[in-house]
Image (cartoon, helix red, strand yellow):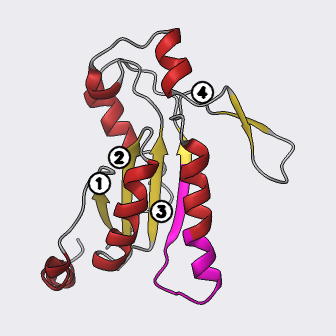
Amino acid sequence: MRKIIILPSFASSHLLKCSIPNWIDVIEPDIILINEGIFPAGPENKGHIDEEFRKRWCHCDYFKHKGSTHLIDVSNAGFDYNDTLDFITQVTKEKFEGNSKIPNIECRVLDYKSNDANECFSEAISHGLDSLVTEGTIVFPLEPDVLFHEDDKEIIQKLISELKPG
C-alpha cells in the first residue's frame, strides 16, 4: 500500500524541518510532495500582495539548480526556498546512506491562476498526484504545521493497515 503526503507550502522551511521527520516516523510515507507557492490572494487569503510584500517574503525571480543550465521561475516561492531545498537534500542523503525509511521527496513551485483560496488549496493538494496514485494508494493532504504525537504512531499504523482499497 503506497502512502503519499502532499502539502501546500509557502515560506515554511522552519516548519518542514520539524514536520517531515515526524511524518516519516509516524506515517512512513513512500513519497512527500511539497507544492511551494503563494496563493495570489496572499497567505490566509488576506490579500496585500504588492511589490513590497514580494521583496520581503518571496524568493528572487529565478533559480538555477546545481549543475543545471535551466533557469526556473520561483518568484512565487517563499524567501526560504533554498532552505527548503537544502533540507530536502539533507534528508534525501540519508536514504542514499542506507536509511530505507526515507521517502522520495519532491518540491515544486506552483503558479496558481485562481484568486480563490479554496481552488488554490485544491490544486496544492492534488498537483502531481495523477501519475502516482493507483488503487490502494493512501493520500495524506497535510499542511506544514501538522505534527502527530509520537504515541499516535501505533494507532495511525493500525488504522492504515485496516484500510481496504476499492
Q: Is residue 79 visible?
A: yes
Q: Nearer the viewer, mark 2 or mark 3?
A: 2
Which of the labelled discs sits on residue 141, or is there none?
1
Q: Position of residue 18 (x, y in %)?
A: 36, 62
Callout 1 secondary element = strand
Q: At x 39% / y 26%, what residue is drawn?
A: 39
Q: Is residue 137 in sight in this rendering?
A: no
State the extent of the magenta-drawn residues as a range.
91-107
Residue labelled with disc 2? 125
Among the two numbered marks 1 and 4 on one chain, the one whose residue lies closer to the N terminus: 4
Q: Earlier in the sequence, mark 3 or mark 1?
A: 3
In whole angstroms, how far apart are the C-alphas of marks 4 and 2? 20 Å
Q: Quadrant of residue 117?
A: top left
The tag earlier along the polypeptide, 4 or 2, is 4
What amino acid is labelled 3 in the image? Leu
* Mark whose residue sits in front, 4 or 2: 4
Residue 50, horizontal then vertical, whole percent: 46, 9
Is 147 on the left-hand or right-hand side of 82? left
Task: Write down the residue under mark 3.
Answer: 132
Closest to the camera, between mark 3 and mark 4, is 4
Q: What residue lies at 14% left-to-right and 77% top-to-bottom?
A: 152
Determine the CA span between mark 3 and mark 4: 27 Å
Direction from residue 97 to residue 45 in the image, left or right: left
Magenta-colored stretch includes residue 103: yes
Provide the residue designation for mark 4: 75
10 Å neighbourhood of mark 3: few (<14), some, or many (≥20)? few
